[in-house]
Image: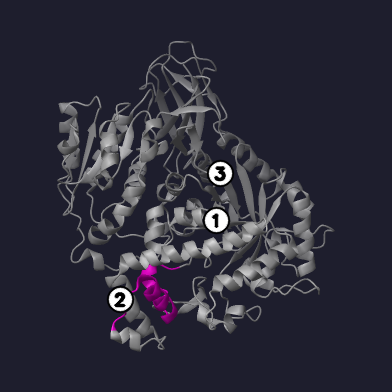
Amino acid sequence: MQGEIHVWMPMIGFERTDPDCGAARVLRQMGFTPRGISAFLFHADIVHHHDGMAQEKTLPPDNCSYYASPSNDERERQEWTNFDLRTLVQNLAAAGVEPYLGIMGVYLGDHWHREWLSDHPEVKSSLRTGSWSLNVLKRLADGTYYEDFFADQLCATLTDYGFAGLQVADNFCPQSYHLAHGDFSADMLKQFLDYTGRTAPAQLEDGMDDESLEMRCLRGDWLWGKHRLEWIEFHVWRWNQFWRKIGGRLHQIGRKAIALGMYCTDPFETLYCKGLDLKGVVEAGLDYLMPNIVPTGLHMQHADWGDRFHRYMALAPLTAAYVPEGKSLSLLGVRDATEEWDVIHHFPCRLERDIYTLLGFHRQTPQGLKRCLTGLMICLGDGIRQEEWKWLRERFEIGFVDGISRILAPTLVWSDAALRNNLPVYIETRRWTLHKTYYEMGRLGALCGAVVRTDELASAEGALFVPNFDLLDDSEKKALASYRRGPVVATAAAGFDLAAWGMAPEVQFTDPHADRPLTAFTFHSSLTEADQAAFQAMADEADDSPDLTGDLSQLPEVPSVLRETLTFTKVSIGFRKACAELLKKAGNAVFTCNLPMVPMLLGDGRYRLYITNYDMLSYGFAVVTAPTPLRKVDNVSKYPLLPVKYLKSPEDTAGFIAKDSTGVEKSFRVKVAPGGLTIVDVTL
């Protein structure tokens, strides 16, 4: 395979009674040797309570299974000892696997064992509504930073067991809550004051010994309500400091670290909601980011939240664009016996679509196209049968496509400067972010096939999509205004002066139904005055839905960082549709299709088409038309089984069965599974 596969494996997925504690059994079941396996010990007390390996000790149930779950498909929870765990880790390493120690920062109230947090409540998260879980950015009662204590314990733990590194997730990094809701303890306030040099109001200074919910709320009102940008910046500094210490210590002993890194869906949300700068933590020493891209599993559990496929998927290309020097292992939500969701059995066509979509994201670089993801982290690996691993491997081989010379769908333009400029603009206006615009266009079938950084624009070709053009730095605006290798489609705040940058749009329209309207435009395209009238009419579609009112900077923040995350001002439905159609029309190249499609040109001259069906309940019938006669079309994905149907014309919906083209047809029909994705190779 062209990328890395890692497996997040709860301890219940191994077999303690085997001589090697299940290492060979697991690898035999997988049928391949993954780059890494994270032995999911779950509770961080495997580190907190570690005191060497002089004596054999039985591990508590919440180290022996995820949340101490009693069973999965294969076995009951087993009683592992520290010696058993060492045997397992050493045998995984001997088989060529990098074994990681996987933990979360949860607190279970001493349900299964006396927890370290019960003896150190000062490092629990102190929120507006209560205290729970671990806040790794806090200080112990003696003034020691938690990370200093943890680094010593961690290095001893990894060395004694033989782990290759650390993998952390929920309630550790990231924390589970939105910055607007905490941690508002005296310790975090004091750290903030030391960092900024600010002086707190007298009421907060006098209440430093008060950890009541009322005092936390007062601190939160001051910090989030009046000093939000600094509160975010402070957390950025603390997370960078944390990973500089942990990463530095791990690298000294030849170990690595993987962190979930974000529980949101793009770098901006992660920065705003978590105070976590993805570029900063990678530069500080984090070896792998692990984007939390599990849209199907979460949708199956929370259907009332709506389908968040595009919103979650955007995390892969946007993270790659923002952190080009980093490595990313996207979570691939296969199944979770503890949380009781199972995509591979209950919605396999969506799992297939997740795999192909995730591995299909690319970044334009001076060295050519580069896959956005380093690889995948299987979530979770226990209970997957041998034939199901084979099913997954077949799709990994297809997904890790190589030899792409060009992606023919529009390329999204990423700017680090626009990310920074977006923070104050979002706070004051709740304006759509690049991420929001990107995924809303995807929902309407206007897909981008690649992403490019503004400092690498010279490597781009074809149509570009630039949300929030006005938030770019001046040098970036100039570079895009002079781009000549394809059309540019963009959005900006209404009133933005295009002429000042030498741009003469062929089409431009403004949202007529929003209080803080956006304008959309394209230049260097082949569109005409007739197109302008059509797009304006589309944007004018009636929309009387309410807009946000009042002081937008003080609106309550969305409590969940999974459901919707950010509150946005109104963008009318007609304007959205017009933007999507503008992107499709300006960016159209070579093929047309009635379903959303991303075409790629392979090095040998073939075209690889990724065709998606948004309908969860019905098969999609994609009709594809090429500019010249088709020589042949080959199925690449495992579905459909039969050859495509060549058509006399795009309107020939009945079609006829033909294994080979007769050499005159320009159109063909191919089926796509419900909620699935079909891949075909086209030779003209």
Segment colored magenta: 177-201
Residue toward you, 454 or 516: 454
Q: Is residue 424 in the magenta section?
A: no
Name the residue beneath numbered marker 2. Answer: 221
- Say if 527 sits above or below 546 in the image: above
Q: Looking at this view, name the residue that lies furthest to the right.
A: 19
Residue toward you, 474 or 320: 474
Q: Secondary structure at mark 3?
A: loop
Residue 286, disc: 1
Q: Is residue 639 visible?
A: yes
Q: Residues within 10 Å of mark 2 (few under 14, many from 20)?
A: some
Q: Position of residue 120 (x, y in %)?
A: 56, 82
Q: Secondary structure at mark 2?
A: helix
Q: Is residue 182 in the magenta section?
A: yes
Tell me the amino acid under the disc marked 3.
Answer: Thr
Give the mark, 1 or 2, whose residue is nearer the N terminus: 2
269 sits to left or right of 526 = right
- What distance separates the C-alpha of mark 3 from that of mark 1? 14 Å
Nearest to viewer (mark 1 / mark 2): 1
Q: Position of residue 308 (x, y in %)?
A: 41, 52
Tell me the amino acid under the disc marked 2.
Answer: Asp
Name the residue beneath numbered marker 3. Answer: 374
Give the mark, 2 or 3, whose residue is nearer the N terminus: 2
Q: Position of residue 338 (x, y in %)?
A: 60, 63
Tell me the amino acid under the disc marked 1.
Answer: Leu
- What distance separates the C-alpha of mark 1 from that of mark 2? 32 Å
Residue 515 quadrant: bottom left
- Counting labels gives 3
- Say if 348 sits above or below 154 in the image: above
